[in-house]
Amino acid sequence: MKGDRVEIVVDAGDTTRTYEVIATRAGRRVETAVRRGVVEVSEVTRSGTVVRTARFMATRVLALVEQPVPRDDEHAGRLPASQG
């Protein structure tokens, strides 16, 4: 969903750095994977094509925060009140 984002906090020696990968268009999503000591965060289209990827050494990653788009579920699953 547009607006989905992942924040990655990385140890950069004396300090920490924060990076964000955000789904920039409607229908895109952000996926994360940890493989062979590498954390990979990718923005992916509906068809599965990777648009861009950020890679970090897993030993340097301090935090990986997935923040989905807030959804308006207030009215989801509710039937309208009958007026009688």
Image: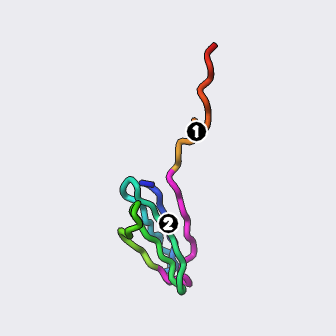
Q: Is residue 80 above or below residue 19?
A: above
The dot on residue 19 is: none
Q: Is residue 12 above or below residue 32?
A: below
Q: Which comes sooner in the sequence, label 1 or label 2?
A: 2
Under circle 1, the secondary element is loop
Q: Main secondary structure of the magenta part?
A: strand
Q: Is residue 14 visible?
A: no
Which residue: 43% across, 70% down?
42
The dot on residue 7 is: 2
Residue placed most toward the observer, 40 or 61: 40
Circles 1 and 2: CB distance less than 8 Å?
A: no
Q: Is residue 82 left or right of residue 17?
A: right
The percent coordinates of residue 79 (x first, y second) are: 61, 30
Q: Is residue 60 magenta?
A: yes
Quadrant location, the C terminus? top right
The dot on residue 76 is: 1
The percent coordinates of residue 59 (x first, y second) are: 56, 84
